[in-house]
Image (cartoon, rainbow, N blue to C red):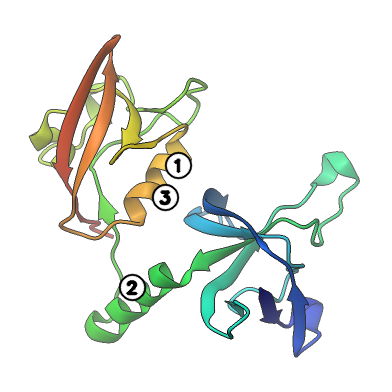
Amino acid sequence: MIAIGSPLGLSGTVTSGIISAKNRAVTSSGGTGESSFINALQTDAAINPGNSGGPLVDATGAVIGVNSAIASLGSSFGGQSGSIGLGFAIPINQAKKTAEQLISKGKATYPVLGIRLDTSFTGVGALIVDQPQGIVTGSPAAKAGLQPGDVITALDGSAINSSDELIVAIRSKNVGDSVKLSIDRSGKKLTIKVVLVASQN
């Protein structure tokens, strides 16, 4: 597997490695104040600033992802900001879906449930804010019977361990898809089906 790009302005650079994880929930702000949520491929191929947007290709030359982000040690570990062997790429099927929407409609949308999550929740799963505004009025979640305070623990049988994991799992789906959510409601286990709709922004 090879990452291609222009790290630190050095054009025509390639680095090699392996895919060390799939479906990794990654949040990246890029310094803009707005977070991007990626259901990422994780690679140990060296990716540095300037690689973003370059292809991640497999041994046959097929593009499998778009280089997007890296993990860094941050200031508490001496301020190292280059590659530490944890790079992330947007899976090509997700990038292709967005590109096709932009070409055909001039804008891209992503699927939503219509809930607000408590990102400070430290338990296992994704906690819907335990206030009335936790469920958006008229949303798929409201129609399906989700309630404030529900903890979503799985989506279509795959475990959900955090709010970020739920967000990227939903965004990997398509508008109109029906998903099965496993819910913990005050100790009671429930299964609820929800049909996803397009985001409004």
Determine which quarter of the picture holds residue 13: bottom right
Label drawn at residue 97 = 2
Where residue 87 appears, as percent x and y from the top left, is 68, 60
Circle 1 residue:
165
Label 3 Cα crowd, 10 Å radius (few <14 / some 14-19 / many 20+): many
C-alpha separation, residue under disc 1 versus residue under disc 2: 20 Å
Most foreground residue, 24 or 10: 24
Where residue 145 appears, as percent x and y from the top left, is 12, 28
Label drawn at residue 168 = 3
Q: Are marks 3 and 1 in contact (CB under 8 Å)?
A: yes
User: Please, what secondary structure does the residue beneath circle 1 have?
Assistant: helix
What residue lies at 27% left-to-right and 37% top-to-bottom?
Answer: 115
Asked if 181 appears above or below 42 in the picture, the reply is above
Amino acid type, label 2: Lys
User: Please, what secondary structure does the residue beneath circle 2 have?
Assistant: helix
What residue lies at 33% left-to-right and 25% top-to-bottom?
Answer: 129
User: Please, what secondary structure does the residue beneath circle 3 have?
Assistant: helix
Asked if 37 appears above or below 45 in the picture, the reply is above
